[in-house]
Amino acid sequence: MSEELKRIGEMFRIKREEMSLSLKEIENATSIRQTYLQAIEEGHISQFLSPVYALGFIRQYATFLGIDGDKLIQEHPEAFKMPRPQQEFSYGIGTLESRGNPTGGVRSIPHLVWGAIGVGVLIAAWYFAKLVGVL
């Protein structure tokens, strides 16, 4: 966590308090969880899932407070650089295994219902045609 992030977070907190808003009120207005808003104010953007989320939430929070988020990020590019998480990927047996879709059976039920309705309509039409004497 850098000093620059702490200063930016402090600026957000001061602006929020000037507007007499709680973190819960901002959460309700922006749909950004309170824990993330608090992380921004404390300068702990490493708590976010990815840099994309962090920058998006900072822009949205800044806009809500009346701060130009894009300008803020452009003026302090080093503050918002987050290390990329190390991803492990090993080639070999098991990396290309296919996995079943857990909702595969559930998705086919509506198709079966509509198919049964279609068959029922065809049988009813055939029976009605026989009854009337068309066939």
Image (cartoon, grey):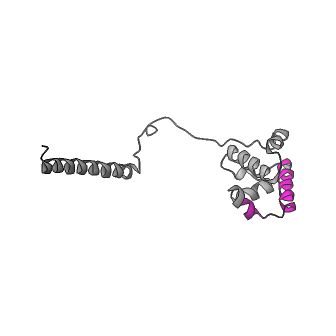
* Picture layout, residue 79 above or below residue 106: above
**In the displayed structure, does residue 92 sit left or right of residue 77?**
left
* Picture layout, residue 20 above or below residue 98: below
Nearest the eye: 46 or 107: 107
Is 67 within the magenta? no
* Picture layout, residue 68 above or below residue 91: below
Quarter holding residue 88: top right
Give how far across and how far down residue 111 sits, in percent. 34, 48
Give how far across and how far down residue 38 sits, in percent. 76, 59
Residue drawn at 52 percent across, 37 percent down = 90
Nearest the eye: 117 or 92: 117
The magenta segment is 4-27
Give how far across and how far down residue 84 sits, in percent. 68, 41
Q: Quadrant of the C terminus?
A: top left
**In the displayed structure, does residue 93 sit left or right of residue 35?**
left
Give how far across and how far down residue 86 sits, in percent. 64, 41
Residue drawn at 70 percent across, 61 percent down = 28
Q: Can see residue 34? A: no
Is 24 within the magenta? yes
Assign the magenta stretch its main secondary structure: helix
Q: Can see residue 112? A: yes
Residue drawn at 68 percent across, 47 percent down = 53
**In the displayed structure, does residue 62 sit left or right of residue 85?**
right
Residue occupying the far top of the picture: 91
Nearest the eye: 97 or 14: 14
**In the displayed structure, does residue 124 sit left or right of residue 54?**
left
